[in-house]
Image (spheres, rainbow, N blue to C red):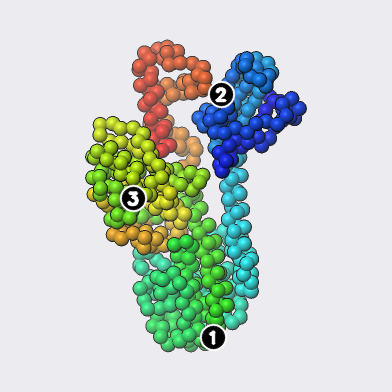
């Protein structure tokens, strides 16, 4: 296979460009062309996601007589050519297929690692632009792997910097609707380990949480919260409360205490507010990845009765019962949602989607007995905003103008920020369910076992025979008649078993 080309997909240009070629390819063919999507054999393979094998290409101007083309996931294609006809056998095909499968996995891993690097570089870039206090916290934020490490490290760094004498961070608790101290540091003898402040209190931290703007207090006599008298007794003269905000979500409040009444001038406020944003940014990066490996989760259910929400206004205007069957985030940041509509005129639903400003495109995929499945593309959506804050949406339904969402978050994540994001964005938002439970990790072997238990013997035999026999290859190496004969059953019966088995596999994958 010494004549080969790897092309990578350029999402901006919508092209496949030759990123790597073998030495013999360079010597024999020189520069290889760039293909658009659906252009040439590489473009067709990339668009369909299916490999293609050509045994005898008589009209190819390049001199090829046979070739294999494989997609490398969503990243590009591999082309393998030969000047001889029938140059590649089944083993060659399997080897190349395995290679591209592994290459796709490697590209996925490299992309994730690049995103991690870019996130860390973004955090470091924010901190490097400001001096003094913030410079001392760079190492804490970049190297911390947990939210607790971030909070404890920031408190220590700030408290060690003059003119600050004590620092503490309070997180909002969604169940008690209070701010609770979680990390603290400093030389001043301020006891905050038992501090719990109502989120609606007339207190600097509660006000900062509500307004998303920092608060400076130079007269602690006005603080009725339990920490106020303790801070005054420890010599604290002024306090600044900084919301730890990332986009439109708040992860808590950073309290910075000083023994000087005029400690928080304009310069200090700018530095501390930038610090608060950087801390929230770091926490978000950590929290967003927790759901992937969490074995304990928080499940929230809430309803929204607000026509600003697409599914709410769509169900209200059409009378349809709507349900999301899954979402996919495209490379350009748009969200594709598969949406079923029941109990209404599907033409009316389609018209409503086509004229809705929040819908970029819509297709009616299938219609059956008055129900329809739509593929819609959204520019902005609540599902995408929730994902940005570390939440996974597991269910979305809507009827009579009321949308119902079910989301999961890591157990360690405070749910108030996420629910508050929705509550602040949409009127008529109600929390209807809050559950904490275990989510055991399922190993690959356990997944296979659970799937195998769902098959009948005939279904598993039909599926395994089809897979091993090459029924799913392209071009197919065997057809349904041959497989039915091998199992000594009729073709319709064979396909009934095969379809039933495939349905169960796809249910495990997509449900």
**Residue at the image position 38 percent from the left and 31 percent from the top:** 504
Name the quadrant containing residue 410: bottom left
- 223 left or right, relative to 168: left
The Cα–Cα distance between marks 2 and 3, rounded to whole angstroms, is 41 Å
Residue lying farthest to the front in this orientation? 355
- Horizontal arrangement in the rendering, residue 289 relative to residue 434 (left or right): right
Quadrant showing the C terminus: top left
Query: If you read the primary sequence from the N terminus, does the residue marked by circle 2 or circle 1 appear first?
Result: 2
Residue that numbered label 1 is attached to: 262
Which quadrant: the N terminus? top right
**Contact (CB < 8 A) between labels 2 and 1?**
no
Secondary element at image label 3:
helix
Where residue 392 appears, as percent x and y from the top left, is 42, 50
**Disc 2 residue crowd, few under 14, some 14–19, many 20+, Cα 10 Å:** some
Name the residue carrying label 3. 310
Q: Name the residue located 53 percent from the left edge and 71 percent from the top edge.
A: 273
Q: Nearer the viewer, mark 3 or mark 1?
A: 3
Precedes in sequence: disc 3 or disc 1: 1
Q: Is residue 286 above or below residue 46?
A: below
For label 1, the SS is loop
Please rate how many residues cluster around mark 1, counting C-alpha atoms within 10 Å: few if below 14, some from 14 to 19, many from 20: few
Sequence order check, earlier mark of 2 and 3: 2
Distance between mark 2 and mark 1 Cα atoms: 73 Å
**Which percent across, then down, holds residue 258?**
54, 82
In this figure, which residue is indicated by the disc labeled 2?
52
| Residue at left offset 62%, top offset 57% | 121
Q: Secondary structure at mark 2?
A: strand
Observer-nearest of 259 and 423 = 423
Residue 198 marker: none
């Amino acid at each position: 296979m010494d004549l080969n080309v790897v092309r990578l997909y350029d999402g901006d240009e919508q092209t496949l460009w030759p990123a790597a070629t073998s030495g013999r390819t360079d010597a024999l063919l020189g520069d290889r062309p760039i293909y658009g999507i659906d252009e040439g054999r590489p473009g067709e393979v990339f668009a369909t996601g299916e490999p293609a094998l050509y045994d005898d290409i008589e009209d190819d101007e390049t001199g090829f007589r046979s070739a294999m083309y494989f997609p490398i996931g969503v990243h590009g294609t591999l082309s393998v050519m030969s000047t001889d006809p029938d140059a590649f056998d089944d083993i060659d095909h399997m080897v190349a297929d395995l290679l591209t499968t592994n290459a796709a996995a490697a590209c996925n891993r490299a992309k994730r690692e690049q995103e991690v690097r870019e996130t860390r570089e973004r955090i470091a870039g924010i901190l490097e632009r400001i001096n003094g206090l913030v410079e001392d916290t760079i190492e804490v934020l970049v190297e911390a792997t947990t939210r607790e490490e971030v909070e404890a490290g920031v408190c220590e760094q700030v408290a060690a910097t003059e003119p600050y004498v004590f620092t503490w961070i309070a997180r909002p608790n969604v169940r008690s609707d209070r701010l609770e101290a979680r990390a603290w540091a400093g030389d001043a003898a301020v006891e905050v380990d038992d501090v719990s402040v109502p989120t609606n209190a007339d207190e600097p931290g509660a006000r900062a949480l509500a307004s998303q703007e920092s608060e400076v207090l130079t007269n602690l006599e006005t603080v009725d919260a339990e920490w106020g008298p303790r801070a005054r007794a420890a010599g604290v003269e002024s306090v600044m409360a900084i919301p730890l905000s990332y986009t439109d979500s708040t992860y808590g409040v950073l309290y910075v205490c000083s023994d000087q009444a005029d400690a928080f001038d304009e310069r200090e406020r700018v530095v501390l507010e930038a610090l608060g944003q950087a801390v929230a940014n770091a926490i978000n990066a950590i929290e967003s990845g927790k759901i992937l490996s969490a074995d304990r989760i928080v499940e929230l259910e809430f309803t929204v009765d607000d026509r600003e929400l697409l599914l709410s206004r769509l169900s209200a205007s059409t009378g349809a019962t709507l349900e999301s069957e899954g979402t996919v985030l495209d490379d350009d940041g748009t969200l594709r949602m598969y949406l079923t509509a029941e109990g209404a005129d599907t033409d009316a639903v389609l018209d409503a989607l086509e004229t809705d400003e929040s819908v970029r495109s819509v297709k009616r995929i299938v219609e059956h007995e008055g129900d329809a499945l739509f593929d819609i593309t959204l520019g902005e959506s609540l599902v995408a905003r929730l994902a940005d804050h570390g939440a996974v949406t597991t269910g979305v339904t809507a009827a009579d103008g009321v949308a119902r969402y079910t989301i999961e978050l890591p157990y360690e994540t405070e749910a108030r920020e996420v629910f508050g994001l929705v509550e602040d964005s949409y009127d008529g938002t109600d929390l209807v369910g809050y559950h904490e439970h275990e989510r055991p990790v399922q190993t690959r072997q356990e997944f296979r076992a659970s799937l195998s238990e769902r098959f009948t013997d005939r279904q598993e035999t039909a599926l395994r025979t089809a897979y091993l026999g090459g029924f799913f290859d392209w071009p197919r190496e065997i057809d349904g008649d041959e497989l039915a004969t091998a199992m000594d059953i009729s073709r319709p019966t064979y396909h009934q078993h095969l379809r039933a088995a495939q349905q169960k596999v796809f249910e495990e994958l997509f449900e």
